[in-house]
Amino acid sequence: MATEVISQQTPTKFAKKLAKGFKRGSNCPNNMKAKTADALNLVDTHNYFSDDRGKVVVVLSDGVSFDLKTNMAATLTKTKTAIENLKIKDVQFATFEFYEYIKGSDDDRYGDLEYNLYKPLVRMDFDSDYRQRFVDVLFSIDSFICPPEDEPITEPPIVCRVPTLDLVYIVDRSKSIAAADIDKVKAFLVELSKKILNDSPDSWIGAISYNIQMIPEIYLQGNGLKRDAATILKELQSISNSTGIGTYTHKALQYVKSNKWFLSNGDNRKDATNLIILITDGVTNIKPYLSKNPKAQGKFSHMTVRAAGSLKSVADIITIGLPNMPAQRLLQGDKKKQILGQAKIDAGLKEWNDMIVARYPDEPNKLKTNLFTLDTMDGMMQRFDDILATVCSSGNTV
């Protein structure tokens, strides 16, 4: 039988495996059969080759295929067919021949008949050291050396000029978000704020976090506030990673819109763009809180959608949808839990989508530019450039 004894791998690993040798195994007793066609067919069907590379098969054999002494001609025909099948796929051959070294004085087999079928690039044997010759032959094959790649066509880099912003971060600190993931949110906000304040030092940044409570973290407006980058970054890092019950997203939007320390001050700067960046992991959930009915997971979403719509004359909004980890864990449970988990995820996605539509009813493209739904918590940093690009394009929409 034909079998793979060393799998496809790097040259170094292959050499180490080869140095250890390999056993024949119980299905390959010595001096019984040599069904070369089966070995060639194994090569043909094992997906060893890539379309864009040169293909060489080295056959080390005594040049005589046989199944039974009485059907050697038929076995040779099978070998010929297997060779031709590989040649159709642009496979070329080299041979290492040891027929002359093992034949007996009365041996009536003719190894050259089979060797000639391969039309080998090089015929090797024990008489000489063919290593350099073999390498030279390989390098003579047109497709052996990969052609130089064309220089990639590069677009000029997009210059992101952050406008002067009055920016408020709204951070979900509900029970469904782990403390470690809130720390990832904070790390993202620190990096984003560094970039914003570096490019636009006249921008102001405020922040609140929320669950059932609204927790002001950094006031946007007020007398005597320190707005330098060092102070803002330190205060972002100081946001607690503790959580509480409830996801009162509608209240958080209303709070930022109406509180004088944020965006409701009559003395708001006229030369700054108001922008809210909301980071949340799921659907609005308020008292008496959502049941386990999959069909009712979006029960309170309309309040948050309405609150987002009321921002049309107040602020731009970017929504960053974090993965709902408890819901994802439900997907690993029984059928009932899977249905509930998927319902929670779908309700969150719908709420975020409807928020953007409500805020930008005539701008369908905002669903692509102002809504970021993430598969992992690391997605915030992975999508950093995209999120920053939307920050840069904020303005002229309020």
Image (tube, rainbow, N blue to C red):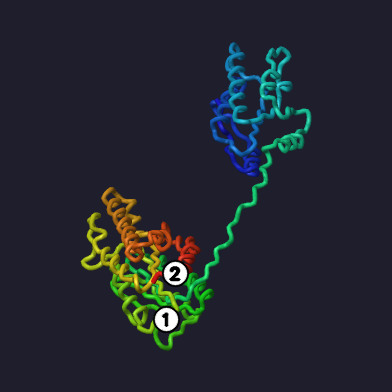
Q: Is residue 41 above or below residue 143?
A: above
Q: Is residue 50 above or below residue 195?
A: above
Single out the residue that lies furthest toward the right.
Answer: 128
- Please state, as top left, top right, bottom left or bottom right, where the C terminus lies in the image: bottom left
Q: Using the image as rendered, state which of residue 304 and residue 72 is in the foreground.
A: 304
Could you tell which of marks 1 and 2 lies nearer the N-terminus? Answer: 1
Residue 176: give x, y in percent of width and height.
Answer: 33, 64
- Please state, as top left, top right, bottom left or bottom right, where the N terminus lies in the image: top right
Q: Which mark is residue 269?
A: 1
Q: Using the image as rendered, state which of residue 89 and residue 386 is in the foreground.
A: 386
Circle 2 residue:
394
Quarter-of-image position of residue 35: top right
Kindly check if marks 1 and 2 are in contact, taking CB atoms under 8 A apart as contact. Answer: no
Q: Is residue 101 above or below residue 244?
A: above
Q: Secondary structure at mark 2?
A: loop
Residue 114: give x, y in percent of width and height.
Answer: 67, 20
Q: Using the image as rendered, state which of residue 222 and residue 79 is in the foreground.
A: 222
Image check: 65 left or right of 245? Answer: right
Q: Is residue 104 visible?
A: yes
Residue 287: give x, y in percent of width and height.
Answer: 22, 68
Local packing at callout 2 (Cα closer than 10 Å; few below 14, some 14-19, many 20+) is: many
Quarter-of-image position of residue 206: bottom left
Image check: 97 left or right of 7? Answer: right
Q: Is residue 241 visible?
A: no
Q: Could you give the CA–CA distance between mark 1 and mark 2, rounded to whole angstroms? A: 16 Å
Q: Secondary structure at mark 1?
A: loop
Residue 388: give x, y in percent of width and height.
Answer: 48, 66
Q: Residue at x 55, y 66 (%)?
A: 159
Q: Residue at x 62, y 43 (%)?
A: 10
Disc 2 residue type (three-letter): Ser
Q: Using the image as rendered, state which of residue 130 and residue 382 is in the foreground.
A: 382
